[in-house]
Image: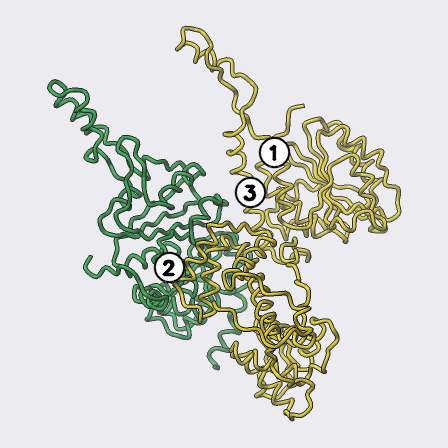
Chain colours: A yellow, B green
Amino acid sequence: MPAPPRSGPENKLYARIPDRGPGGFDGQLLAFAEELRDEGMAVGTSELLDAFAALNQISWTVQADFKEALAATLAKSPDDRRTFELVFERFFFRAAEAEAARQDITEGPAADGQGFDMDLDVLRQQIAAALRDGSEGAMRDLARLAIAAFGRGEGSGVLGVDVQRIRRALGLRTDPQPDLPEDDPRRHGVPRDQLRRFEQHLRRELERALIERTASLPPKRPLTELDRALPTGPIQDLAAVHRVVAQLKRRLATQGHELRGRKRHAHVDFRRTMRASLQTGGVPVELKYRPRRPRRPEIFVLCDVSTSVTSASTFFLSVLHALHDSFRKLRSFVFIERISEVTEVFERERDFRAASEAVSRDAGVADISGYTDYGRVWTEFLALIEDELHPRATVIVLGDARTNGRPPRDDVFAAITAKAGRTFWLNPEPQLYWNYGDSVIAAYAEHCTAFECWRTDQLEDFVKALAQPVQAR
Amino acid sequence: MTDTIQEPNSVEEVAAGLRAAGYLPGESTALVSYLAAKLGKPVLVEGPAGVGKTELAKALARYLGRTLIRLQCYEGLDEAKALYEWNYRKQLLRIQTEAGDAGWQDVQDDIFSEEFLLPRPLMTAIASPEPVVLLIDEIDKTDQEFEAMLLELLSDFQISIPELGRIEARTQPVVLLTSNNTRELTEALKRRCLYLWLDYPELEHELAIVRLHSPDLDESVARKLVEIIGQVRELDLKKPPSIAESIDWARALILLGARDIDADVFRQTMSVIVKHRTDLDTVAARVGVKLEPAKDASTAA
């Protein structure tokens, strides 16, 4: 691709727009791959070669084909595909805008809402109609008109705020608005995903206008972890939870096999060695080893179910119970101020929703205030279970370690961890918030291994660690 | 094979060809199939059960006018069942008939020749004089060792037999691997493949598929059917209904002569789309009850 000539002499534009990378289009594609890598995708050289080969075979005039060809060669799992979509949007939008700024291409001053009359009600109706019909091109054009009409010049500086303000000014809502006239397309509510698409267009056009106005690219927004976060609503998106559980179960099952094959155990199987030695006249030339069994730990789970962490803990309990074949013994307790065993509830209720209802109904763990009392919980737990703890048992605590100002009693906790073989603490808060306010996780972390656990992949890492055979003590 | 199409020339051509073969491809499906034929790279097709992964391979074979060779994977599948096996009995016979006269060298050279080779699906696909479509179905059911064995085949289209040497593909096969994503496949395998994710189709697309497979069904009934299927998929089920189930349901409705899907019809035929006891209850409680008012609305419209 020949590089288009740069327009004009050195002006202040060049100081702020980064120079074009070397190598024309190829360079751009490499930069794109680099961004994918930055977001955690494994893009190898062979994949890049494939991408170039694929692009040779298709026409670049169809954007969908161009994107699909890249996706088919670079993104090799549904997760990667999602990342790819986001990075693709971001990268090519920025690349195009940077190029436009370099070449001084602007779209003319149409903004401000002055100088052209527009019947705002007609515009509202047109936009709603475009949303109903779902035509992409019309939506984009109308998004620009809407910004011109309702954008009010510079805007607030925060794109999200501007987008919502314009949406409200247009009267677009997903729920039906019965007081509107019969022929208004907004009367029955606007389809949700269309509205989201329109908001994306708005955001894009606003961003474009911002780049034109300031002649600089805003900082690149890294992808957030939000879409990988654990379900936070009470019983929101159950299907997603079950998918995670099913996945974990399969991973656990295959993982055992892997370990069995790979690692040699040091225990000699005497009987098999002697049998084998018969071939060599009774001389044990070849040693036979006992196969290594995957560890099936005994687990005691303690879950905080106070309102601040309840969804995370019920979710976590149901995950553990879905996985209960992998453990020799699993006993679960929930606590707020007092402690209560709920093993049976989860054995009886296979359904996550029913289980969480039963826990909140029957457990009776909130005594008076409904605030977590860790000190009392440790004491009760120790009294309840002291005789059953042994070095092969694993204790898992799930909670945010927020004591509400009550004594943490980490000495009792230390007594528990001393009796048990391993103790894990899962904190559903991001590590950033640890030890802030009334969080005393540091006091407990001295006696156990603390994990941050608010995303499904963190949970998966933890379950893996749990199922891994430990070195015999 | 008279009307063998060697190479398609454009994405549209592939899309049209697949459509003519009775398969309605999505946007990316046609493109990836086209790239697969052009670049000679295997395609890894992933997606939930019943979205037409295997069907895609069949349709490609029909469209390209090639034979479809299918290797169904399962746990414990090994080289002897996937690649080749020596025909032991025949070798034994050969040795017995000539044991007296021929020297050791002769017999040895002889019994390890292609005559005594039993080709299994992968070998058949490689050695075929005509180009074929090779479908390796449910690759995620096999173990990692088998995957590793496939690597040579997938990148170079050749198989090494110690006694015979290398057997190279005479023609370029189109290779499709399908996976239900029950296990993470190895990076090495993924790197050698193009990737295609098939998901449940959008409403209009699925409607077209149902109409294609059961054209006798009334248009409005078909639309309603697809809408209900969409609602059912939103629920948290053990096994959400796939496209195959939509088609089955459409056929069942034709057989019953249903003019509309109301609560009664739904209750009677629900078991076509939902296959678990607990799922049946969920669906009846969440979707079935909504149907009565929906029926009135549709008759009014």
Q: Looking at this rendering, what residue extends furthest in the left direction?
A: B101
Are the residues flagged by discs 2 and 3 from a single subunit? no
Which chain does the numbered disc 2 sit on?
A: B
Which chain does the numbered disc 1 sit on?
A: A
Percent position (x, y) of residue B203? 46, 69
Q: Amino acid at mark 3?
A: Lys
Mark 2 residue crowding within 10 angstroms, few (<14) / some (14–19) / many (20+): many
Q: Secondary structure at mark 1?
A: loop
A13, above or below A453, in the image: below
Q: Which label sits on residue B33? A: 2
Percent position (x, y) of residue A72? 46, 57
> Which image quarter: residue A249?
top right
Q: Mark 1 or mark 3, which is nearer the start of the sequence?
A: 3
Give the residue pinned by disc 3. A249
Are the residues flagged by discs 3 and 1 from a single subunit? yes
Mark 3 residue crowding within 10 angstroms, few (<14) / some (14–19) / many (20+): many
Q: Which label sits on residue A468? A: 1
Mark 1 or mark 2: which is in front? Answer: 2
Which chain does the numbered disc 3 sit on?
A: A
Percent position (x, y) of residue A409? 86, 37
Q: Do the numbered discs 2 and 3 sit on residues whose CB atoms are within 8 Å?
A: no
> Which image quarter: residue A332?
top right
Question: Quadrant where the C terminus of chain A lies?
Answer: top right
Q: Is residue A351 left or right of residue B195?
A: right
* Front position in the image: A22 or B50: A22
Cα distance between the residues tagged 1 and 2: 41 Å
